[in-house]
Amino acid sequence: MTQRREEIEAFVRYLVAEVEAAEAEGMVSPQAIADHFNGKGLTTRKGRGWTGETVAKFLSSPGAKRYRSGGNVGSKFSAGRFDSGG
């Protein structure tokens, strides 16, 4: 797997873990999860803020579905953005 692909997969795993944590706290709508992400300073891979629509698209993506049941959380994340480490 290429480094870029590995970084994307780590980002997806991290976001899935964040979604599941938000859901455990009672945030179940895409907009509530987007507000939670934005409140924590998390951005999309392109550095943009989250909307309910972007959360819904993420949750319906094959990558998110693949990791929805758990997985290891990546450790290459800063408070706001994914850090590729390179």
Image: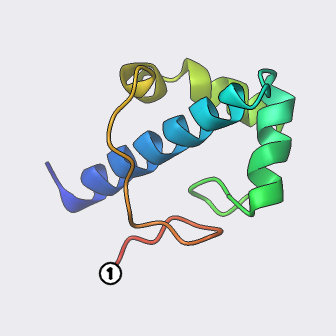
Q: Let me know if residue 49 appears in the view.
A: no
User: Could you tell whether 20 is left or right of 28 in the image?
Assistant: left
Q: Residue at x 40, y 67 (%)?
A: 76
* Type of amino acid under label 1: Gly
Q: Let me know if residue 70 appears in the view.
A: yes
Q: Residue at x 41, y 20 (%)?
A: 69
Of all residues, the one furthest to the left in this rendering is: 1
Q: Is 27 placed above or below 35 here?
A: above
Q: Position of residue 58 (x, y in %)?
A: 60, 31
Q: Residue at x 39, y 48 (%)?
A: 73
Q: Foreground residue, 24 or 17? A: 24
Q: Position of residue 1 (x, y in %)?
A: 13, 48
**Quadrant that contains the C terminus:** bottom left
Q: Position of residue 79 (x, y in %)?
A: 62, 70
User: Could you tell whether 60 is left or right of 8 in the image?
Assistant: right
* The quadrant where residue 29 appears: top right
User: Could you tell whether 82 is left or right of 49 in the image?
Assistant: left
Q: Is 72 placed above or below 30 here?
A: below
Residue located beneath label 1 in the image: 86
Q: Is 77 placed above or below 72 here?
A: below
Q: Residues within 10 Å of mark 1 (few under 14, many from 20)?
A: few
